């Protein structure tokens, strides 16, 4: 979300500098970048309450004095007689409508409204829609504006099976399919609820009578719909993350006030459907438990002050405000306290973890994983959803991604995608495996099976014994030759003709029910030495790698360990890896030759030949400083 520094400052009575404000936002967990005094903030999905100026200022209330009450219309509002039928109360049990009519022309936008469009370079639409868009930015509650003359006096909200065309107010034609939560008028869909309204009933620059819809949709009723129809709206972004169910009257009174600031109001009427069944979340006031979770001695006064500043109401119990739909238990309260204190300000405490160099693995699945890892395989974890429809695949009713509508009925397809990704990054030895549940339809039943899939392609390994050997069907058969199981007929060759690659190296895959292998591994008494040092993740570079091959000739075979040690300890810039791929002993001339491959890559750029050659010269000089060794270049 983009927030203009000056706009946010209007809600902070204290006036922190951009640098100070940035520091506090990071402390609260709101990562961001700043460009031309515009904060581009990444909020975690559970913090939908911060997706507005007031929401963000409310979070900053723990550090600064704030003004969280914008000017709203305070007079009585007559009731609106409106034929609204709600057939989807499980998805939307709180909704209000404001009917407002203006007379004459609108005045030029006041600074607070004009600056919203100019500072964020947002295009104006029409008077009522502009106010709706600004309100979502200011308060965080999406509203939708219908032209009252076009919508009539009847509206229905329902989950409806659709198979019709729908033109959005953005001018995009979409084909409705399956069941969707929609607003209909006279049997015609006029609004894809919580996502986007329709062109047929939208406001224009000529609209004088407007019907404003203000609703609370359960996030799970909205999630996935924007992806389904490839519509990325601000409304869906907010509804998916949860909005305040109790803010409707305040929002609509603010809407009226903004209209009043710019036009003469002829009439206003309000329809409210707000049942009194809202259940407040309450938690025990437990400073001792929260202190233990954080690892500090927490005073009750500090605990209460922080939570009050964040909008919590404290009586005998702790009442969670309606805008915080992410707070459920004491761990959540501990997180609130910790981020206000600052994680960097929590004292460090030493912990003691026993270090056992050898671990016995009792699970057959664990034994299988370790066996594969020790044979050079990498475990991968992929999405359980697939875009491919194959026989017996199961269609998802409401997919999060319209490009992945099916549950995987095979793991191998995912491993092929992993292979292509790695081959494009110059990986020439691919050994992958994945263990996952798959789902298939059989005899009108959905069945779950846990499979293991292995996929290999390229060289067997990066050493002089395996460098020239290819990963093939024979390799997979030999891998499990000590097991009492026949896998010959289950190994397949994956054809490359439909893959997005120019590489021709054969691909072989094996996918079977894991029980077939794990039952064999149950018999093994398996132990493994654990690493003594911490293994840190190294990001994969997006830039291509280069390699150079050098052949060293040695008159004394006893020098080989010295060469290996020297090369393994090289730390030249851009040198990513080095391994021996050839070893040849010429007994006639009493000379031993070893071939080494040096791989170069940068995380920041594509390397030039000159940059690689410069490092190669340094490597040559280092190795040639060893007695009885000379160089033969390829």
Image: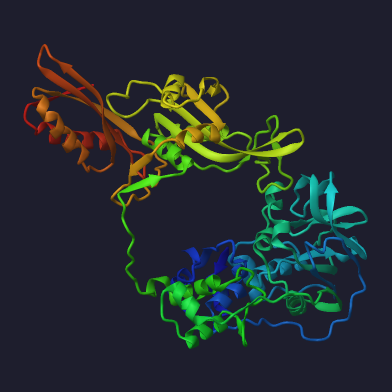
How many marks can you see?
A: 0
Q: Is residue 516 left or right of residue 481?
A: right
The answer to whether residue 282 is above or below residue 617 is below
Pick the residue in front: 367 or 524: 524
The answer to whether residue 92 is above or below residue 316 is above
Residue 598 visible in image? yes
Q: Is residue 515 left or right of residue 533?
A: right
- Quarter the N terminus occupies: bottom right
The answer to whether residue 215 is above or below residue 79 is above
Q: Residue at x 40, y 32 (%)?
A: 427
> Which of the 4 image quadrants contains residue 460?
top left
Q: Residue at x 59, y 61 (%)?
A: 45
Pick the residue in front: 316 or 157: 316
Q: Residue at x 75, y 56 (%)?
A: 196
Relative image position of residue 252 (x, y in whole percent): 76, 75
The answer to whether residue 258 is above or below residue 440 is below
Q: Is residue 136 left or right of residue 538?
A: right
Which residue occupies the extreme top position in the image? 588
Relative image position of residue 380 (x, y in whole percent): 48, 40
Q: Residue at x 68, y 68 (%)?
A: 243
Model colouring: rainbow
- Quarter the C terminus occupies: top left
Residue 123 visible in image? no
Pick the residue in front: 410 or 52: 410
Pick the residue in front: 174 or 625: 625
């Amino acid at each position: 979300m983009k927030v203009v520094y000056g706009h946010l400052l209007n809600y902070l009575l204290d006036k922190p500098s951009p640098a100070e404000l940035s520091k506090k936002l990071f402390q609260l967990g709101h990562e961001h970048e700043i460009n031309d005094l515009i904060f581009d903030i990444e909020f975690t999905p559970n913090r939908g309450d911060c997706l507005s100026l007031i929401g963000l200022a409310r979070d900053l209330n723990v550090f600064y004095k704030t003004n969280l009450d914008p000017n709203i219309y305070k007079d009585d509002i007559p009731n609106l007689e409106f034929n609204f039928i709600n057939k989807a109360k499980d998805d939307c049990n709180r909704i209000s409508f404001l009917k407002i009519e203006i007379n004459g022309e609108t005045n030029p936008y006041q600074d607070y409204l004009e600056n919203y469009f100019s500072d964020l370079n947002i295009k104006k639409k029409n008077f009522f829609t502009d106010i709706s868009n600004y309100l979502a930015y200011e308060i965080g509650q999406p509203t939708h504006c219908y032209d009252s003359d076009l919508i009539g006096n009847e509206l229905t909200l329902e989950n409806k099976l659709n198979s019709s065309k729908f033109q959005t107010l953005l001018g995009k034609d979409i084909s409705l399919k399956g069941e969707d939560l929609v607003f209909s008028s006279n049997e015609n869909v006029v609004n894809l609820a919580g996502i986007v309204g329709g062109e047929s009933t939208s406001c224009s620059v000529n609209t004088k009578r407007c019907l404003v819809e203000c609703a609370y949709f359960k996030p799970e009723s909205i999630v996935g719909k924007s992806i389904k129809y490839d519509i990325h709206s601000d409304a869906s972004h907010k509804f998916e993350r949860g909005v305040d169910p109790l803010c409707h009257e305040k929002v609509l009174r603010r809407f009226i006030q903004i209209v009043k600031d710019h036009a003469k109001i002829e009439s206003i009427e309000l329809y409210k459907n707000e049942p009194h069944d809202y259940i407040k979340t309450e938690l025990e006031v437990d400073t001792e438990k929260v202190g233990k979770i954080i690892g500090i001695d927490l005073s009750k006064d500090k605990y209460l002050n922080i939570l009050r500043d964040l909008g919590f109401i404290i009586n005998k119990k702790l009442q969670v405000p309606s805008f915080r739909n992410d707070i459920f238990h004491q761990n959540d309260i501990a997180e609130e306290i910790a981020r206000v204190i600052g994680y960097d300000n929590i004292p460090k405490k030493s912990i003691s973890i026993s270090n056992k160099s050898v671990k016995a693995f009792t699970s057959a699945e664990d034994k299988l994983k370790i066996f594969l890892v020790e044979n050079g395989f990498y475990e991968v974890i992929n999405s359980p959803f697939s875009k491919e429809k194959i026989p017996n695949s199961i269609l998802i009713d409401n997919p999060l991604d319209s490009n992945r509508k099916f549950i995987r009925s095979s793991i191998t397809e995912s491993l092929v995608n992993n292979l292509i990704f790695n081959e494009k990054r110059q990986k020439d030895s691919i050994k992958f495996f994945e263990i996952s549940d798959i789902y298939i339809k059989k005899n009108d039943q959905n069945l779950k099976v846990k499979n293991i899939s292995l996929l290999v392609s390229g060289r067997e390994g990066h050493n002089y014994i395996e460098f020239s050997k290819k990963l093939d069907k024979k390799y997979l058969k030999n891998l499990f030759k000590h097991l009492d199981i026949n896998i010959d007929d289950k190994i397949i060759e994956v054809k490359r003709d439909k893959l997005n690659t120019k590489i021709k190296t054969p691909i072989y895959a094996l996918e079977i029910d894991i029980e077939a292998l794990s039952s064999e591994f149950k018999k093994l008494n398996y132990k493994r030495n654990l690493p003594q040092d911490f293994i840190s993740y190294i990001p994969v570079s997006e830039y291509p790698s280069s390699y150079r091959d050098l052949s060293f000739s040695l008159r004394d075979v006893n020098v080989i360990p010295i060469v290996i040690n020297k090369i393994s300890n090289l730390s030249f810039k851009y040198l990513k890896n080095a391994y021996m791929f050839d070893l040849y002993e010429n007994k006639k001339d009493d000379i031993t030759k070893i071939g080494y491959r040096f791989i170069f890559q940068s995380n920041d750029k594509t390397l030039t030949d000159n940059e690689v050659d410069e490092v190669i010269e340094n490597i040559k000089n280092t190795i040639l400083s060893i007695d009885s060794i000379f160089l033969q270049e390829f």
